[in-house]
C-alpha cells in the first residue's frame, strides 16, 4: 500500500529546504532532482516503512503563481490541439461538399494541401468505407489474344542495327528539347 505526502520546497540560498508538515520533517537538498528521493527516504525512516511505499508530491508555494500560469497555458494548448483536427475536418466537409469549393481552394483557405483536404472531406455517411481504387476490369470483357503491334519508335529486330549519331541542337530550338522530341 502506498502512502502519499506533500513536500513543500523553498529556496535557502543555493539549497532547497524541504518540509513535510504531515510528519513534521525538515531536510534540505542541492537540486530539485534530489528533493523527491530525500523526502521519500526521510518519511520512510521517520515512519519505519519501506521508501518504495511512499509517494511524494513536490510543491513550491512561492513559485505557484508562475507555475500555475504555465500549467493553465498547457491545459489550453492541449484542449486546442485536440479540437483543431475536428474543426479542420468539419470545415473541409462543409467547404467541399456543401459549398462546392474545390479541394485546392479549400486547402488554400485552411492552410492545408489539397491531399489533406481530400482525406478530411470524405463523404459523411458513405456506404462504402473502402478507399476508391479506380475502375476494375469486368470478368466478361474480352481479352486481347494477338500481340500488340510494334511502335514506330521500336528498333528493328536486325542484328545490323547501327546506333544513330547524336543530334545537334538547332539555333532555333533549345538544347534540352533535342533528346525528347521526335522531330
Image: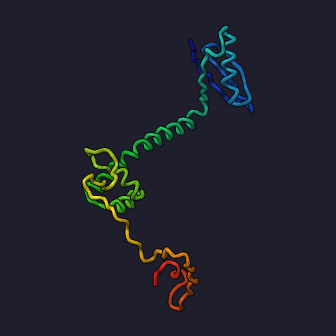
Q: Which quadrant holds the N terminus?
A: top right
Where residue 116 appears, as percent x and y from the top left, is: 40, 54
| Above or below 72: residue 159 | below
Q: Is residue 91 visible?
A: no
Q: How is the image coloured?
A: rainbow
Instruction: Residue at the far front: name it.
Output: 159
Where residue 177 appears, as percent x and y from the top left, is: 51, 81
Q: State the residue at coordinates (61%, 26%).
A: 58
Where residue 120 appears, as percent x and y from the top left, is: 36, 50
Q: Is residue 15 visible?
A: yes
Q: State the residue at coordinates (47%, 80%).
A: 181
User: In the depicted view, which residue is nearer to us: 74 or 132?
Assistant: 132
Q: State the residue at coordinates (40%, 56%).
A: 115
31 to the left or right of 67:
right
23 to the left or right of 142:
right
User: In the depicted view, which residue is nearer to us: 101 or 33?
Assistant: 101
Amino acid at each position: 500500500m502506498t502512502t502519499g505526502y506533500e513536500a513543500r520546497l523553498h529556496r535557502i540560498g543555493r539549497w532547497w529546504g524541504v518540509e513535510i508538515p504531515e510528519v513534521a520533517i525538515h531536510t534540505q537538498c542541492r537540486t530539485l532532482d534530489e528533493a523527491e528521493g530525500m523526502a521519500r527516504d526521510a518519511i520512510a525512516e521517520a515512519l519505519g516503512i519501506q521508501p518504495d511505499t511512499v509517494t511524494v508530491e513536490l510543491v513550491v508555494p512561492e513559485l505557484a503563481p508562475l507555475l500555475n500560469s504555465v500549467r493553465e497555458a498547457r491545459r489550453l494548448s492541449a484542449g486546442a490541439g485536440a479540437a483543431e483536427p475536428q474543426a479542420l475536418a468539419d470545415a473541409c466537409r462543409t467547404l467541399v461538399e456543401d459549398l462546392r469549393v474545390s479541394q485546392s481552394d479549400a486547402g488554400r483557405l485552411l492552410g492545408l494541401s489539397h491531399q489533406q483536404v481530400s482525406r478530411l472531406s470524405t463523404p459523411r455517411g458513405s456506404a462504402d468505407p473502402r478507399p476508391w481504387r479506380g475502375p476494375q476490369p469486368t470478368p466478361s470483357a474480352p481479352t486481347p489474344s494477338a500481340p500488340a503491334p510494334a511502335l514506330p519508335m521500336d528498333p528493328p529486330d536486325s542484328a545490323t542495327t547501327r546506333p544513330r549519331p547524336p543530334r545537334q541542337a538547332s539555333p532555333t530550338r533549345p538544347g534540352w528539347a533535342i533528346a525528347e522530341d521526335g522531330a
